[in-house]
Image (cartoon, rainbow, N blue to C red):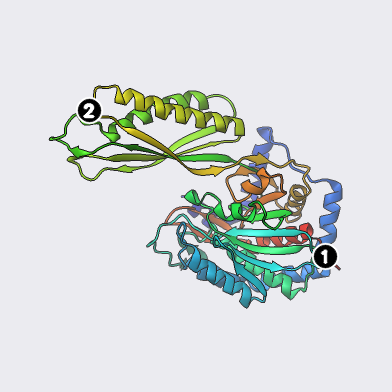
């Protein structure tokens, strides 16, 4: 319904934006304004002939960028199965003229444009993987100006933006002082647990000085804070048997029921107060047939918080709830007993960069220069890792108009989408330092 309204009433978008901005003021949200010195720096760069040339080229290749988007979208990239898309993305960077492109040990694509000074590394990143399982139909369908396909926006649009950025930088012969890495990362979604970016920030890896991710929707987004999360698989095990012949035998599903009740009651009391914290039981499984006592039962649990201390607390509540429920169930008089294994399947650290961080300031200023009201956000993205380590990092939007992310009916419309590409280029060049 929202998509149809936006598409049919595009003329009203400026008015809607004004209404939203006024609403923000009314609820007490202060406008985010960059330092005058930063604004001057951004303004000077926007007047540079080579930057203007790059922007013009981005406009000129919009059809080409759309073809890149469609090509990549139609290459499946299920969790832990990004290799085929990674190879295609690598080849597309090479065909665009980037000479130093490789795929690392975990599957990240890294294209390096050397700087004139060296010694500093600025990364422009988008993730390769999607949330959709193997076998999902990812064929792109175009109706009018709207592209439909699972993953068309999240985050394949980001990958196509990286390619367009490099093409524009090459065409305009832009030289930066720092090395610029164009990176397609694996494992951003779900159980991937940010494995791609974690690998790039592992001990002993090449030092990365600044990180810019493209992920999410609106061009006004400046994500400077990481939403921490921890995820577990709780595995309850028993002997299993026939539902009639072995009736009375300890049942893992029944124990799981005890655990769900114990945890949800305790976690709700905790999350009802204090800094926002959430919990969710997202998946459950186990058992072989309706007339069999299962030998195992499992659930996957996601916990998040804006505060690292509270995240640790809700994790402790989860662990204690599982143990308490296990003991209570085993003391109900069942034959034999159930065992429990807790397997950590996700750990995304939290953190927040100061508003005064130069990269954050530059993102605010650059966003404003394109006529958008910058909005500081907190999210769970690749940026979590560098932010948690104190490395300047932001996540910006892919622009355009879209919806249905993580669903089979995902869609995206190129509504001023080139502006998001230009913004990404501008931020990358500012951070890397333009060499005249």
**Closer to us: 244 or 64:** 244
Q: Position of residue 417 (x, y in %)?
A: 62, 62
Q: Tell me which residue sits at (42%, 27%) in the image.
A: 321
Q: Position of residue 139 (x, y in %)?
A: 43, 67
Residue 207 in the image: above or below residue 339: below
Residue 264 in the image: above or below residue 167: above
**Closer to us: 11 or 327:** 327
Q: Residues within 10 Å of mark 1 (few under 14, many from 20)?
A: few
The residue singled out by tag 2 in the image is: 335
SS state under label 2 = loop
**Closer to us: 103 or 399:** 103
**Residue lying furthest left:** 245
Q: CA distance from mark 2 to mark 1?
A: 71 Å
Visible in this render: residue 144? Answer: no
Q: Tell me which residue sits at (75%, 50%) in the image.
A: 359
Q: Tell me which residue sits at (23%, 45%) in the image.
A: 288
Task: Report the side of 334 relative to 429 (left or right).
Answer: left
The quarter of the picture where residue 209 lies is bottom right
Q: Which mark is residue 398?
A: none
Q: Which mark is residue 117?
A: 1
């Amino acid at each position: 319904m929202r998509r149809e309204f936006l598409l049919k009433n595009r003329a009203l978008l400026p008015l809607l934006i004004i209404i939203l901005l006024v609403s923000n003021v009314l609820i007490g949200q202060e406008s985010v304004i960059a330092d005058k010195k930063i604004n001057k720096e951004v303004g000077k760069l926007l007047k540079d002939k080579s930057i203007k040339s790059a922007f013009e080229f981005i406009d000129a290749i919009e059809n080409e960028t759309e073809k890149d988007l469609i090509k990549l979208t139609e290459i499946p990239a299920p969790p832990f199965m990004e290799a085929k898309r990674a190879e295609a993305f690598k080849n597309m960077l090479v065909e665009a003229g980037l000479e130093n492109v490789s795929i690392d040990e975990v599957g990240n694509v890294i294209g390096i444009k050397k700087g004139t000074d060296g010694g500093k590394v600025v990364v422009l990143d988008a993730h390769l993987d999607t949330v959709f399982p193997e076998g999902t139909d990812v064929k792109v369908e175009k109706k009018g100006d709207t592209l439909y396909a699972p993953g068309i926006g999240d985050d394949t649009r980001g990958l196509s933006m990286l390619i367009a950025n490099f093409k524009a930088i090459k065409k305009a012969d832009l030289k930066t002082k720092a090395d610029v890495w164009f990176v397609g990362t694996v494992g951003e979604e779900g159980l991937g647990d940010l494995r791609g970016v974690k690998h790039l920030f592992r001990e002993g890896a090449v030092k990365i000085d600044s990180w810019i991710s493209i992920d999410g929707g609106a061009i006004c987004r400046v994500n400077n804070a990481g939403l921490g999360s921890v995820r577990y698989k709780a595995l309850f095990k028993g002997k299993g048997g026939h539902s009639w012949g072995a009736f009375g035998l300890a049942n893992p599903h029944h124990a799981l029921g005890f655990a769900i009740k114990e945890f949800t009651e305790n976690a709700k009391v905790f999350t009802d107060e204090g800094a926002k914290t959430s919990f969710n039981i997202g998946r459950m499984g186990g058992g072989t047939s309706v007339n069999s006592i299962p030998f195992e039962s499992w659930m996957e649990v996601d916990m998040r918080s804006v505060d690292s201390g509270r995240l640790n607390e809700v994790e402790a509540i989860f662990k204690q709830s599982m143990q308490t429920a296990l003991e209570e169930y085993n003391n109900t008089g069942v034959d034999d007993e159930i065992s429990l294994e807790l397997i950590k399947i996700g750990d995304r650290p939290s953190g927040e960069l100061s508003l005064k961080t130069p990269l954050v300031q530059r993102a605010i200023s650059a966003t404003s220069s394109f006529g958008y009201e910058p909005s500081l956000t907190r999210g769970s993205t690749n940026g979590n890792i560098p932010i948690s380590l104190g490395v300047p990092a932001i996540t910006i939007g892919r622009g355009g108009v879209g919806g249905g992310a993580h669903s089979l009916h995902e869609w995206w419309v190129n509504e001023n989408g080139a502006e998001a590409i230009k913004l990404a280029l501008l931020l990358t060049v500012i951070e890397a330092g333009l060499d005249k």
